């Protein structure tokens, strides 16, 4: 069998066939095979010019290396980043002032780690406290003994507030809490409550009612006794269209002035409601109406006035007059 071809610069160790030469190969090919093996070795190890002393175990340490080892080592030295615990006989030394605040993650320094130095600072630097244990926690706490301040709390100047309390109340303890409280005794004011001028309101109540308790609430109420109303004007609405729907929210007097027949639609019956329609043209009615006389009246010449009142079930209607110029 012919030997593998081992000549040329592109032949390497992996080109050798381990079963060559066979017992039946010609002896005359032996020198060719030896020269081929030499060629393969020189191609595979072109830079080995002396003895190679590492063992196979040591050489296998570079298994899996994908780039220059020295370059990787240089990079490790330049970007010296460490994670995890540092162990070993030699301590890791960090130069003074080498760790800056920006390099410390938020919430990564615990109170226990700072306790000794902080307690010392508080005990020696804050003369109002005997020990750090006397300090209030950040969320607040109970203070005992006299407290003096020349500053503000929540934007309130304490000195100014104390002056106001002193001049207007017996003691500061008589002041109402911020959230409100019960006031006793006579209260005098020349200001306003919720935008209402007290002096003006008291003047109106005094002139029109026996006591302030007799006033109706803002949202309305029930009046009892004889009530006299003066100067009341009904609200008027109307249309010139061929159709019109009565809406009692718009008024109680309606005038329809269409050039010809106008169809008027009644509102929903509501007890105690009443309204008047003035029609300058004949009107047709849409809705449930119980007419005086049993049928809808006809309009005469000129304007016709219709009156309606409801008991909550039906509308009762009547022609009040006609022929108005």
Image: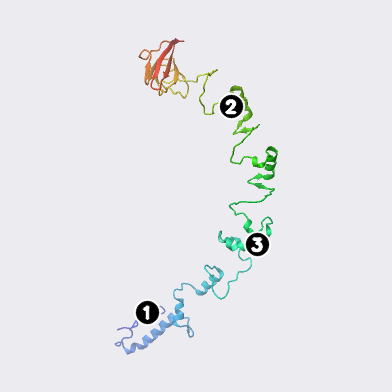
Residue 214 position in % (x across, y down): 56, 25
Judge by depth and name the residue closer to the eye, 5 or 174: 174
Confirm whether residue 275 shows in the render. Answer: yes
Give the class, few, some or many, for how many residues have Cα within 10 Å of label 3's Cα (few <14, many ≥20): few
Disc 1 target residue: 15
- Residue 261: assigned label: none
Q: Select label 2 or label 3 by which is in front.
A: 2
- The residue shown at (41%, 13%) is 319
Instruction: Give the side of residue 2 with respect to residue 265, left or right.
Output: left
Q: Residue 270 sits in which quadrant?
A: top left
Q: Residues within 10 Å of mark 2 (few under 14, many from 20)?
A: few
Q: Tell me the residue at 46%/77% (across/down).
A: 61
The image shows a total of numbered marks equal to: 3
Q: Which residue is mark 2?
A: 212
In the rendered image, residue 150, in percent from the top left (x then y), is placed at: 70, 48
Frontmost of labels 1 and 2 is 2
- Element carrying mark 3: helix
Which label was assigned to residue 120?
A: 3
Left or right of residue 205, residue 51 in this image: left
């Amino acid at each position: 069998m012919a030997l593998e071809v081992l000549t040329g610069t592109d032949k390497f160790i992996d080109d050798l066939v381990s079963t060559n030469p066979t017992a039946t190969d010609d002896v005359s090919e032996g020198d060719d095979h030896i020269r081929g093996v030499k060629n393969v070795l020189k191609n595979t190890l072109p830079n080995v010019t002396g003895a190679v002393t590492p063992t196979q175990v040591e050489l296998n340490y570079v298994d899996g290396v994908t780039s220059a080892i020295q370059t990787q080592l240089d990079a490790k030295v330049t970007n010296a980043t460490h994670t995890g615990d540092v162990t070993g006989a030699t301590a890791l030394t960090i130069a003074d002032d080498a760790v800056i605040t920006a390099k410390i993650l938020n919430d990564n320094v615990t109170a226990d780690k700072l306790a000794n130095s902080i307690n010392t600072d508080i005990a020696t630097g804050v003369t109002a406290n005997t020990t750090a244990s006397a300090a209030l926690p950040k969320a607040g706490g109970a203070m005992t003994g006299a407290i003096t301040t020349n500053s503000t709390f929540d934007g309130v100047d304490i000195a100014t507030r104390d002056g106001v309390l002193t001049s207007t109340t017996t003691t500061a303890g008589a002041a109402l809490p911020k959230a409100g409280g019960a006031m006793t005794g006579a209260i005098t004011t020349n200001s306003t409550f919720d935008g209402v001028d007290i002096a003006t309101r008291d003047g109106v109540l005094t002139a029109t009612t026996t006591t302030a308790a007799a006033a109706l609430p803002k949202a309305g109420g029930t009046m009892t006794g004889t009530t006299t109303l003066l100067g009341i004007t009904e609200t008027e609405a109307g249309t010139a269209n061929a159709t019109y729907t009565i809406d009692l929210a718009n008024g109680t007097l309606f005038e329809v002035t269409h050039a010809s027949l106008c169809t008027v639609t009644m509102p929903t019956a509501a007890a105690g409601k009443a309204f008047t329609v003035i029609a300058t043209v004949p009107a047709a009615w849409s809705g449930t109406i119980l007419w005086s006389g049993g049928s809808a009246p006809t309009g005469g010449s000129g304007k016709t006035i219709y009156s309606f009142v409801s008991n909550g079930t039906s509308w009762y209607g009547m022609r009040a007059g006609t022929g108005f110029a």
